[in-house]
């Protein structure tokens, strides 16, 4: 039992250390993702899409080559990334 608690303590310590390294923006985005995953918060999902759609689209157009395919891939990537597994 003590070993399990020790592992849990180390995991929590690691999470705290990561949070110390994250910017305020990253912490905000992390909270938005958590809201989407935990409760399906549509407002949080829309905010993430508004923030990152152009960046994702720019990468997808390089990969796909056509605007239509890039749009499809952009939407699909958001749907896949924020889907509970």
Image: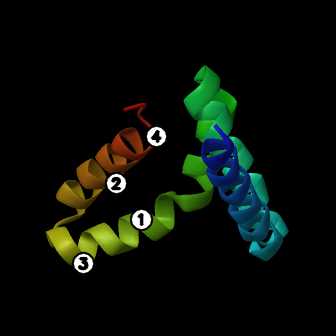
Residue 18 position within the rendered picture, expressed as x and y whole percent measured from the top left:
71, 68
Q: Distance between the residues labelled 4 and 1?
A: 14 Å
* Labelled disc at residue 74: 2
Disc 1 target residue? 56
Please name the residue shown 56% across and 32% down the image. Answer: 37
Q: Nearer the viewer, residue 19 or 71?
A: 19
Q: Is residue 28 visible?
A: yes
Tag 2 or tag 4, which sits nearer the N-term?
Answer: 2
Secondary structure of the residue carrying tag 4 is loop
Q: Do the residues labelled 1 and 2 touch (CB within 8 Å)?
A: yes
Q: Are marks 4 and 1 in contact (CB under 8 Å)?
A: no
Colour pattern: rainbow
User: On the image, which quarter does residue 65 sit in?
Assistant: bottom left
Disc 3 target residue? 62
Q: Distance between the residues labelled 4 and 2?
A: 13 Å
Secondary structure of the residue carrying tag 2 is helix
Is residue 75 placed above or below 45 in the rendered structure? below
Q: How far apart are marks 1 and 2 (CA)?
A: 6 Å
């Amino acid at each position: 039992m003590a070993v399990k608690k020790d592992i849990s303590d180390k995991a929590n310590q690691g999470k705290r250390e990561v949070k110390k390294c994250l910017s305020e923006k990253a912490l905000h985005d992390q909270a938005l993702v958590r809201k989407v995953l935990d409760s399906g918060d549509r407002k949080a999902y829309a905010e993430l899409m508004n923030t990152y759609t152009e960046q994702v689209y720019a990468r997808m157009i390089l990969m796909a080559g056509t605007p239509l395919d890039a749009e499809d891939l952009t939407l699909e990537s958001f749907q896949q990334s924020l889907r509970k597994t």
